[in-house]
Image: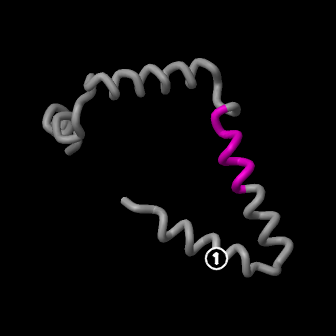
Amino acid sequence: MNLEPRKVDLISWITNINNAKLIEMLENIRDQEDNWWEEIPTETQKIILESEDQADSGNLVSHDQVLKKYKKYLK
């Protein structure tokens, strides 16, 4: 998915905003996005990093495989 056109559209929109409250809200969103990693527990960070390593090495199970295995429990 190419996000570039959407980013450009948002940049264009933001440059035309004259509402200080809206700018403040956007800044808060930006700041939250930048800090989310530091806000989660260290143990959770380790688990996420391990999961990324497993996925990068091809050690993962597809959604279809999981559904096949656990379909009987979903009824």
The image shows a total of numbered marks equal to 1
Q: Nearer the viewer, residue 9 or 66?
A: 9
Q: Position of residue 30 (x, y in %)?
A: 70, 54
Residue sitting at 72 percent across and 75 percent down? 15
Residue 9, picture quadrant: bottom right
Q: Position of residue 56 (x, y in %)?
A: 34, 27
Q: Is residue 14 left or right of residue 54?
A: right
Main SS, magenta residues? helix
Residue sitting at 49 percent across and 26 percent down? 48
Residue 70, picture quadrant: top left
The answer to if 35 sits in the magenta stretch is yes
The answer to if 50 sits in the magenta stretch is no
Locate the C terminus by quadrant.
top left
Q: Nearer the viewer, residue 74 or 27?
A: 27
Residue sitting at 63 percent across and 20 percent down? 42
Q: Secondary structure at mark 1?
A: helix
Q: How is the image coloured?
A: one colour
Q: Position of residue 46 (x, y in %)?
A: 54, 19
Q: Nearer the viewer, residue 22 or 18?
A: 18
> Amino acid under label 1?
Ser
Q: Is residue 75 above or below residue 51?
A: below
- Which region of the structure is painted magenta? 29-37
Residue 27, picture quadrant: bottom right
Residue sitting at 68 percent across and 44 percent down? 34
- Within 10 Å of disc 1 (Cα), the crowding (few <14, some 14-19, many 20+) is few
Locate the N terminus by quadrant.
bottom left
Q: Which residue is mark 1?
A: 12
Residue furthest to the right in view is 20
